Image (cartoon, grey):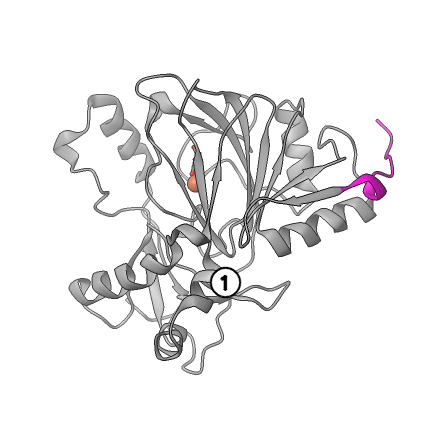
Amino acid sequence: MTATSLSTKLGIRKLTARIGAEVTGLSPDRDLDAETATAVRAALNEHKALVFRGISLDDEGQQRFAGYFGPLTSAHPTVPAVDGEPNVLPVDSEDGRVNHWHTDVTFVLNPPQASTLRSIVVPPYGGETLIANAGAAYRDLPGPLRDFADSLWAAHTNDYDYAVPPESLNETERARRAVFVSTKYETAHPVVRVHPLTGERGLFIGGFAQRIVGLSKGESKDILRLLQAYVTRPENILRVSWEPGQLVLFDNRITQHYAIDNYDDLPRRLNRVTVAGDVPAGGHRHGAPRQNWK
Ligand SMILES: O=C(O)CCC(=O)C(=O)O
Ligand SMILES: [Fe+2]
């Protein structure tokens, strides 16, 4: 397919005051020229989550679209990809429900900068994805808390006590969990991340952040709960309702997300493709504990 200049037709409609926009006049299934890709990146910088509706993408198309924003990661560090598509992760309700707040794969040194999710099977009700603006959360903090957060580092790991106790998991869920932690990762990141393209600061925590470097588990839990409460304020959240032919692109450097488990046992399936990211940078006055923080 040839590149088509679409940027003049690009429409950006805000979905909430603080996060999210629907992009119209652009088919992610067409080739994007440089100007259009730049306009989409600018919209992503501003709105943090972009919704594209009425699209007809296959796995190839989703990967091509994600590729405009940088090189792709493998599907996941531990979870197998879609057969024959090493960059595509199946997100299938049969394998479990991601109903906890997180940012994708933050337990590695350079987590994916952006994720795309594409609807494959949509339940007739429920199954929405929440996406939270972690930059607004940071700005909502009272000054002294902001300064405090600025000074912290958090250890992120894929091996932690998930909200669900292991004894309540069924066999499939237990097996999936075992695959997820088959290689254990732990990485320290700044709690306040400076976005490399905009300079905007955001809380960079989420479910894989399990401990604050230098604090006990108990102290860490309290601090993380306090900060996380700002991320999940309703004002900071976009609620994405899924429909067939939909793609959502979100900026992992400054958002968290949560898949709501409110669709009974109905099937739900999305495919995820993520764009490789940089090593998170903070605005620290205290140096980096990355090398010897354990
Ligand atoms: O199912 C969703 O809406 C989100 C899935 C997700 O967060 C993930 O696969 O990391
Ligand atoms: Fe996720």
Instruction: Point out the image quarter for the C terminus.
Output: bottom left
Residue 229 vertical placement versus 10 (above, below): below
- List the single residue furthest toward the bottom: 285
**Can residue 197 be seen by looking at this rendering?**
yes
Residue position marked by numbered label 1 in the rendering: 280
**Residue placed at 49% from the left, 75% from the top?**
283
Residue 227 pos. (x, y %): 33, 63
Residue 292 pos. (x, y %): 34, 71
Where does the magenta region start and end?
A: 1-10
Q: Is residue 19 magenta?
A: no
Task: Say few, some or many: other residues with alpha carbon within 10 Å of mark 1 (under 14 / 14 to 19 / 20 or more).
Answer: many
**Which quadrant of the view contains residue 198?**
bottom right
Q: Quadrant of ligand 1?
A: top left
Residue 73 pos. (x, y %): 55, 42
Front residue (pair 106, 203) = 203
Q: Is residue 7 magenta?
A: yes
- Three-letter code for the amino acid on which mark 1 is drawn: Pro
- List the single residue furthest toward the left: 167
| Dot 1: element | loop
**Can residue 211 be seen by looking at this rendering?**
no
Instruction: Point out the image quarter for the N terminus.
Output: top right
The chief SS type of the magenta part is loop
Would you say 245 lies left or right of 174 here?
A: right
Residue 158 vertical placement versus 281 (above, below): above
